[in-house]
Amino acid sequence: MNRTIVISQILVIEQAPGWLVAALNHAIIAGVLLIGGAITMMLQVWVERRLIARMQDRLGPNRVGPEGILQSIADGIKMFTKEDIIPRAADRWVHLLAPIVALAPIAMMLAVLPWGRGLVAVDLEVGVLYIAAVSSISGVGLMMAGWGSRNTFALLGAMRSIAQLIAYEIPLIIALLGIVLLTGGMSLARMPELQAGIPLFGSSIPGAPDLGLGWFIFTPVGLLGGIIFFICALAEGERTPFDIPEADSEIVAGYMTEYSGMKFAVFYIAQYLLNFALAVLSAVVFLGGWQGPGVAWLADAGLGAAASLLSLLWLLLKAWGLFMLMVVIRAAVPRLRVDQLMSFAWKYLLPLALVNVASAALWVGLTEWSSIEWGNLLPVDGLAPWQRIGVAALVTAVINLGATRWVLRINRAPAAAPVVVPA
Amino acid sequence: MSDQPAAVRLTAALPAAWRDAARLEAHAADLPAVARFVRDRLGYAMLTNLTAVDDLARGEIEVVYHVVSPAGGAPLAFRARTPRAAARLPSLVACWPGAELQEREAYDLFGVTFDGHPDLRRIYLWDDFVGHPMRRDFPRQGDKYIAGAGEE
Amino acid sequence: MSAHESQLLQVNIGPQHPSTHGVFRMEVTLDGETVVALRPVFGYLHRNHEQLAEASSYIQTMPYTDRLDYFNSMTSNYGYALAVERLAGIEVPQRASYIRALMSELTRILNHATAIGFMINDMGAWHTALQFGMREREKILDLFEMASGARMMCNYFRFGGVVRDLPPEFLPYFDQLMRGLPAFFDEFEQLLRDNEIIVARSSGIGILPRDVAAGYSVTGPVLRGSGVPYDIRRAEPYGIYGELAFDIPVGSVGDVYDRTLVRFAEMRQSYRILQQIRERLPDTGGGHINPALANFGKQKALRPPAGEAYARVESPKGELGFYLVSDGSTQPYRYKVRAPSFINLTPLGAMCRGHLLADVVVILGSIDIVMGEVDR
Amino acid sequence: MSSEQQPGVIVVDRGHPATRDGRGLVRGIGVVLRHLRDAFGPRLERPEQTSGVFTVQYPEERTPLPEASRNLPILLFDDDSGHELCTSCYQCERICPPQVIHITQARDPASGKAVPAIDEFILEYDACMSCGLCAEVCPFDAIKMDHAFELSTATRDPLTVDRVGLARPVSYYAQLAPQAWAEARDGAMKKLQGSRRRRTGTVGMTPARAAPAPADAPAAPIADAAPAGEPAGGEPVPASDAKAARLAAIRARNAAATDAPAPDAAPAPAGEPVGGEPMPAGDAKAARLAAIRARNAARQREGGDA
């Protein structure tokens, strides 16, 4: 990673002790990320409300600030000044800690995401593993909230959220695993770098321009993986149609039922931040992250800072696009029932994710193994890399398409015997 | 109001059941038999409306049953009377499950006890309410319950 | 059965809950998320409407009937006016009957559009379907306001007719609305009907089989969804409904999905009826009210002869009946409302048993209740 | 299924399972996106449109109210002479379903005889349900339904509106409902001439003349009823205090006479208004009700002071 400029290296202060420099660097970066996160969350709420309003032939909040853009700040002030209620029967400390436990891991997720060319706060070699591990901690916070509130709705919501998180974490991670196989590493910072070049073939064709479009979503493995990952991200982030833990029409607000004021706002922030983090993650892993037309050109022209800025823009554009897709889905569809959610995870997503991992392995074999490793059964040595990618794409496309059709067909079984009112 | 041929058939088939055949007023004890005949033989599958009427002058409560046939036509009304002081009638829930909430309503507001009802509780008023407010002699107290509840 | 011991969970859904459509409570006993028992609890909105009516003169009750089913005050008015007209033997001129039917069918469209929207909301959608329904409802309410002076509490009907004839701006607005309605129906259906999630959430849920539905006294789209083609507009036609051509949509399974589809189809049938009414309306005669009762003093002093009358109309929610007993005075001796929302709740516990908690609100939504009518 | 054979019955189509596998969801998203696009286009203005923003930005934009629109009752007075059209015939008080109208009749200061004019007219806006029966029943076209609906207040007191707050000139109503007034005008004015002949001095003249012209200020009843700011800290202003007491007194006085709605009562003749035959039980009951209300009002005042 010789081209990577880690932010912390910008702020080298001569003659300062090393630990102080490191502490300052981390504090600044954390501050930037958290403030950015808060602003992002406010923008998200505003964008969501305005967009959904338009889809419903309304205007949405348009009073506070120009076009209502400060509405979230007004809401935030309201939240801050609201009375903080702790139910008498609640477990005080658990009730208090739950929002923090829910928010903290999500803030930690922001650290390892590559925000642009050379813009990564912490470059972990095991970024994917870290994300998977940290994101599941926030489920503990939800369970604490539901249990600590001593409210039946909250308890039901907590149970649902745990069941949902566990069920969807598996296909989510397996979908990531396919890409891990393709990239041969778990570093999130490296993933965008491997998605340069042109669609499908990346930079394997000599002489082809580096458009920054070699996104994994253009490969069959990445396409299926991306779709699975996005669906799981909806479920992880409790977005419609998977907002079952807080199904307001059924269990009022789920685990948040007994929360008010600032603690409620913390849950709210946690949720939107998680949605955004997952959108960024989807963009990084499947949509090329910060790659995009122009980045490589600027970098080659020696304009490193401009390239970083453009790459940041590309990433935000993709992440916001995915978030808006979430918004559109929220406007258009109702939520699933908890058993349908489970069966969707286990009967559709998990088998497809497993098939996708197999396809990914085949892809790696077809593009990188030599004929000897194939036991001389496949004479692949004579082919150019781009030809081998073409073959791999064809094979994996057939496998993935067939698997999808098969999974859809076997699950089209008649529903269980309906419950009938006794005469 | 009542469908003439059906009423005629009903009175002819159960001649002993009537206290006042012209109004299709049955004896309380014969009510289930009348209901079964109406439902099974005359085809009135739906008990559409159950109304209690407090006849203060005669000291009785009349319960009017409006039944309709899914095939159409005007509803058939038959009725039964019970003394106000000890209002009891057999429940028709076994015959028409749709009577359940309506009998509870009559019990709550008029104090008619329906024998054989599976779950005869007050439906609108709270459980320790005293009296049956739709009876004609229930005092009309204005907004006593809003602010004057502490006294009296 | 599982080997481990489990405890049942008691959950009170309501009286304050987002999906109880008012102040309604359900005591639900859950095993995990499966409903073991469900008891509806009523009375939070009870205001002794019937006693109020027995202490008022006949016309004074008319505005109170608006408050029964506050979505459909026009049909509530219609039922009450019909009962008093039967009791007192009042004739209704032809034009008044047409206006009444016009208002009833507009009411049906607005009720079904919002009822479906609310039910989809109960399924967890984010108000989109509801907003589309509300948009059309607003237009219909504009019409109601032109005619009656109020959007929701119309108080438009009088004994022997309606309070005033349609104003001149009514019909042009109505024609425009009619031009837009088919597009609304199509789009609404496109948005909802083939949506996999809605189908999955509603088919096979809350089945009320055909052979028990009538026994439970349910009426309206709930009964028709169960496959019984019972519609008072045809079973016992009132007003001009005997002269109008329309079909009765029925379901085949009797689940939530069938009820929704029946509502969809009924909106289209109402549209058909409205077209026929619009065609004939200019040729109708007789004025908007029976001349003998055109003076409000006559309405006020109405003393129906002693006797009883039961009149019912097909309100959008089902059979809305009014039972009146007169003792010859200016006040009814007995006034009883047969409220469809209330009686349609009879099989709620039976329909919900064995389903999941999430289905309970959907089943309740598919019954389409209004608490003003349930608790009276 | 037998219903399929019946004429006039259609069995609804439960849809086509072949269109599943997410295609329905995509169509739904398509509908939503179409609305998103249309919402940036022209506003929904004609009822035939089914897309486009249909909401109104309320305080700045208002949709015109149709002529028939009714909100709360007002009392008309003649622009030229300032005479109120009301003759205190008690018809509206009797018809009012929630019983929120309270009238006392004016008396000739010299002879003490009742004249066809009001001494006080109190209307509880907070309990009025805007049914419009009072306007319909009024034989003198004196009470009409207003279009003003922005009547929210911080306390309930200003919503008990008296003769001053209710008064509106005839021209105000004529502008609200030109057509209805055109039909009613001649009769109403003729009847006003008749009742004016029996009034003397300032009896029947609206006291609202001194107040700002209500036609310019639709929210006049509130301004009139709560002069110079809202009562602060729950301490009732003396004016509303007095009004509540006066209201209780009127109720107690009228309760006996107007207990049962008299069916054919003509405009009340001179002397104390007498309704139909008062029921023996109703008399006592109504008096008790008035006493309860007065007591409640008193307690509320005590609570407010404490």
Image (cartoon, coloured by chain):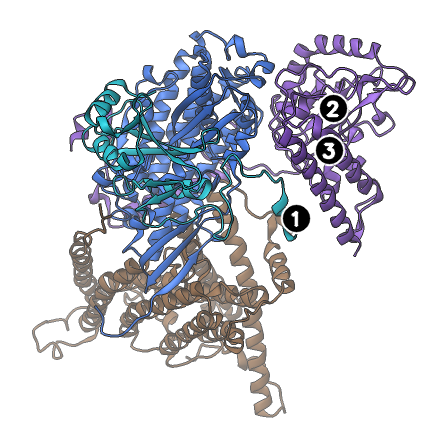
Circle nearer the viewer, 2 or 1 = 1
Q: Secondary structure at mark 1?
A: helix
Report which residue position mark 3 lands on.
D251
Mark 2 and mark 1 residues within 8 Å of each other at the beta carbon: no
- Of residues C126 and D103, the one nearer the viewer is D103
User: The chain coloured purple carries which letter?
Assistant: D
* Image x and y of residue C253, in percent: 22, 41
Spatial CA distance of label 3 from label 2 is: 20 Å
The circle drawn on residue B147 is 1
Local packing at callout 1 (Cα closer than 10 Å; few below 14, some 14-19, many 20+) is: some
* Residue that carries the numbered disc 2 in the rendered image: D75
Query: Do discs 2 and 1 belong to a common subunit?
Result: no
The chain coloured blue in the image: C
Neighbor class of circle 3 (other Cα within 10 Å; few <14, some 14-19, many 20+) is many
Q: Are marks 3 and 2 on the same chain?
A: yes
Location of the N terminus of chain B by quadrant is top left
Which chain wears brown? A
